[in-house]
Structures are given as structure tokens and as C-alpha cells.
């Protein structure tokens, strides 16, 4: 009994091995087609994942521009949109417009924690999403160029092991970025620099930052730079290749609005925030004196410009409301005139109907003999023949008096 059981187990093992060998030979024969199907399924899975992710953050398909261009409306950071959907808050959208033939380098300034770095990352991610064929969290109709390189220097890369400070780490990354952009002029690049030349002497850092910005504007591609240097803010006034933009800040409530305003630089609000936070007046006066008239004057000029822009926006809003009210009033007037015309027509039809009904009742009550006979059309009176009188001959002499026409005398019987 034991020997037969052992032999049966061996037969089962041999049969299992034979089946597995046959299956392995069949799989090996179909290996190329299986690998191709696996690659196709992987591509389909990636496409489906892109579509699901784009729908999750409310993306739209943007047009791919021929040249170096970033023109987006209501652009948002995709990660913030996903986080806002989970936690129940809305993300502030911004408009960005950069073109190779117009503004090539955008200088973004404003207060700390005002959203400059987030906007920088939003533009970079949007360019990468377009290059990957994915939806972009922005309004449909925007245009983004196909950039060969999207290079960014964002964050702090200081390292104790690598003997890199904050400034040297940024400088090393900047050198690599500039070398890569200048190596091949035919390649179209998008360079994003956060707090350019920060962490060193302010005067020397501002000079280095301006030189780098001018070199970046001379290369093929676009760039966005965030900074607090006043020298970079003034580049847009002297060079058409640069454009200013500032992040708004609510000075009354001491909180950022995260909205971008293109065309005007942003303020740092350092002295204003310090005054509202209760810093002594003598300390503030000393700080203003140390800052110098140029710096404080620029801040005041920007503040006055922002005030004028706010007043202009309010006036534009009031004009738009007045225009809408006027349009609505004209529409109401047209509707009233149309209703009056319809009422007059109804009254005319009602009057004719009432007249016909009275005539019909009179005819039914009096009979056919009482019916008003139809009167013939009145004949036109005969035309009276005008009597012709012989016209006296006209005198050739101007001095002689004119001859009087003889009066008509009635003939006696």
C-alpha cells in the first residue's frame, strides 16, 4: 500500500512538472507579443492616470505656442488645488503673460510669504505639464511654449558636508543654469530664479543680480526672477525686455492676498508692518533715516501708484455699474414702448370688433329693411373752367405805367 501511494505521488509530481514546462515553452514563444502588450498597457495606464489627475485639479488643455511664450489666465498650483479640495479652501488664481517678442524676464517683488515662490513654481509646473501632454489648472485658451529646458533655483541648498553656504549654494546652481542655457542657443529654456543673489552684501548682491538678469534677457528663452532689490525693480523703466509685477498685501489686516499685479513692482511693507506691530516711533524714524531717501521715496512712489490704481479700479467699477444700469433702463424703456404699441393694437382691434358687433345686433333687431344701405361713393365736383382774359401787351418802355386789366362788368338783360 505504501509503495503504491509513493508511486502515485511521483506520478503527480512528474505531471505537474510536465504541465509547467509546456506552459513555460508557450510563454517563451509568446514573449515578444507579451512584452509589447505590457508596454501598451503601461502607456494606457499612464494616459489614464494623467487624465484622472487633470480632472482632479480641474485642468484644461492649453495651446502649445510656436515660440517662447507663457500666457495663462487663472493659473493655479496643482498641488494647492488638490489640497484645497481635501481641506475645503479655495486657491487664488493669477494671470501670467510672458513673450519672447515683448517681456522676456518678469521681475516679481513683494512682501515675504506673499506668494512669490508659489507663483514661480506654478509657472514651472505648468510648462512641464504642457510638455508632458497633461492638463493645466488654468482657464482654457491660454498658450504655453514647448520649452526644451525648465531650469529652477528655488529653496536653500546649503550643506555642511559640501562646504556650501546659502549664497554659495545658490551661486553654484546659477552657474550651472547659465552654462546650460548658453551652451546651445537653439534650445528654448525657461529659467526660474527665486531670491536672486540673496544672502550676501546687499549692494554687491544687487549688482550681481542685475548683471545676471541682463545676461538672461539676452539669451534665447524666458525667465522669472523674484527679488527685493530696488535696482531690479527699476529695470523695466529703462529696458523693454523686463517687466514688473508685484504681489498684493493687505496692509490693514497685515495679511497677503496672493494676487499678482503685472505692471507695477511690489512693496516690501517692512516699515509699515513694523509700525502696525507696535515698534517704537523713534526706532522707526531711525530706520527710515538709515534706509535713505531713495529707498523710502521708492516705497512711497509705489504706495501712491497703488493708491491711484485702486482709485482707478473703483472708478472703473462704478462706471461699469452705471453702464449696466443705463443698459437695463434702455431695455426697460424698449419693453415699455413695445408693450404700449401692443396695447394700442389690442385696443384698435377691440374697437373694431365692438363696432362690428353693434352693427350685427342692430341688423338682427331691425331686420334687413333697417340695415344701413350702402352709400355710393361721392362724385367729385365738376371742375370749374377758368375764364381767360386777353393779356395786355407788355410795354417795352420801362417808364410808362403798366396797363390795368379791365374789370368784369355784369351784362344787363
Image (tube, rainbow, N blue to C red):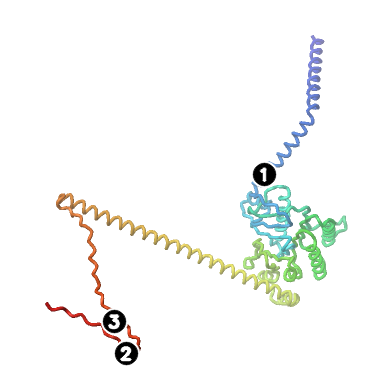
- Where does label 1 land, which residue? 51
107 relative position to 254: left or right = right
The first of marks 1 and 3 along the sequence is 1
Furthest toward the left, the residue is: 413
* Secondary structure of residue under mark 3: loop
The percent position of residue 390, horizontal first and vertical second, equals 27, 78
The first of marks 1 and 2 along the sequence is 1
What distance separates the C-alpha of mark 3 from that of mark 2? 14 Å
Picture quadrant where residue 400 is located? bottom left
Judge the density around disc 2: few (<14), some (14-19), many (≥20) Cα neighbours within 10 Å. Answer: few
247 above or below 57? Answer: below
The first of marks 3 and 2 along the sequence is 3
- Where does label 3 land, which residue? 392
Q: Note whether residue 198 is visible.
A: no
Residue at 80 percent across and 54 percent down: it is 187
Q: Note whether residue 84 is visible.
A: yes
Tag 1–tag 3 contact (CB < 8 Å): no
- Where does label 2 land, which residue? 400
The percent position of residue 296, horizontal first and vertical second, equals 71, 75
The percent position of residue 298, horizontal first and vertical second, equals 71, 73
Amino acid at each position: 500500500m505504501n509503495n503504491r501511494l509513493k508511486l502515485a505521488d511521483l506520478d503527480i509530481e512528474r505531471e505537474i512538472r510536465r504541465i509547467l514546462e509546456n506552459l513555460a515553452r508557450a510563454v517563451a514563444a509568446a514573449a515578444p507579443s507579451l512584452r509589447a502588450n505590457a508596454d501598451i498597457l503601461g502607456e494606457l495606464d499612464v494616459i489614464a492616470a494623467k487624465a484622472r489627475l487633470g480632472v482632479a485639479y480641474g485642468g484644461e488643455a492649453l495651446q502649445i505656442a510656436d515660440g517662447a511664450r507663457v500666457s495663462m489666465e487663472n493659473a493655479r498650483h496643482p498641488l494647492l488645488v488638490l489640497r484645497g479640495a481635501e481641506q475645503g479652501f479655495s486657491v487664488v488664481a493669477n494671470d501670467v503673460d510672458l513673450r519672447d517678442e515683448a517681456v522676456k524676464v518678469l521681475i516679481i517683488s513683494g512682501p515675504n510669504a506673499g506668494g512669490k515662490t508659489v507663483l514661480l513654481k506654478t509657472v514651472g509646473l505648468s510648462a512641464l505639464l504642457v510638455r508632458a501632454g497633461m492638463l493645466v489648472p488654468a482657464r482654457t485658451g491660454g498658450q504655453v511654449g514647448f520649452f526644451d529646458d525648465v531650469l529652477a533655483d528655488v529653496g536653500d541648498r546649503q550643506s555642511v558636508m559640501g562646504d556650501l553656504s546659502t549664497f554659495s549654494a545658490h551661486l553654484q546652481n546659477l552657474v550651472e543654469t547659465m552654462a546650460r542655457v548658453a551652451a546651445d542657443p537653439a534650445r528654448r529654456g525657461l529659467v526660474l530664479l527665486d531670491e536672486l543673489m540673496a544672502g550676501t552684501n546687499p549692494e554687491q548682491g544687487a549688482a550681481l543680480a542685475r548683471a545676471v538678469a541682463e545676461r538672461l534677457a539676452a539669451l534665447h528663452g524666458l525667465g522669472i526672477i523674484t527679488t527685493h532689490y530696488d535696482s531690479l525693480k527699476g529695470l523695466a523703466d529703462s529696458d523693454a525686455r523686463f517687466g514688473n509685477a508685484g504681489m498684493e498685501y493687505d496692509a490693514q489686516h497685515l495679511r497677503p492676498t496672493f494676487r499678482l499685479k503685472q505692471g507695477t513692482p511690489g512693496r516690501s511693507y517692512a516699515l509699515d508692518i513694523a509700525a502696525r506691530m507696535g515698534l517704537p516711533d523713534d526706532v522707526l524714524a531711525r530706520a527710515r533715516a538709515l534706509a535713505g531717501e531713495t529707498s523710502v521715496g521708492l516705497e512711497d512712489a509705489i504706495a501712491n501708484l497703488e493708491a491711484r490704481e485702486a482709485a482707478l479700479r473703483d472708478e472703473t467699477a462704478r462706471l461699469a455699474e452705471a453702464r449696466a444700469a443705463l443698459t437695463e433702463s434702455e431695455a426697460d424703456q424698449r419693453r415699455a414702448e413695445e408693450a404700449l404699441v401692443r396695447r394700442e393694437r389690442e385696443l384698435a382691434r377691440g374697437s373694431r370688433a365692438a363696432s362690428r358687433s353693434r352693427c350685427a345686433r342692430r341688423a338682427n333687431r331691425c331686420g334687413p329693411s333697417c340695415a344701413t344701405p350702402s352709400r355710393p361713393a361721392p362724385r367729385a365736383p365738376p371742375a370749374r373752367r377758368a375764364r381767360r382774359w386777353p393779356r395786355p401787351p407788355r410795354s417795352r418802355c420801362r417808364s410808362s405805367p403798366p396797363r390795368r386789366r379791365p374789370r368784369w362788368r355784369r351784362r344787363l338783360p
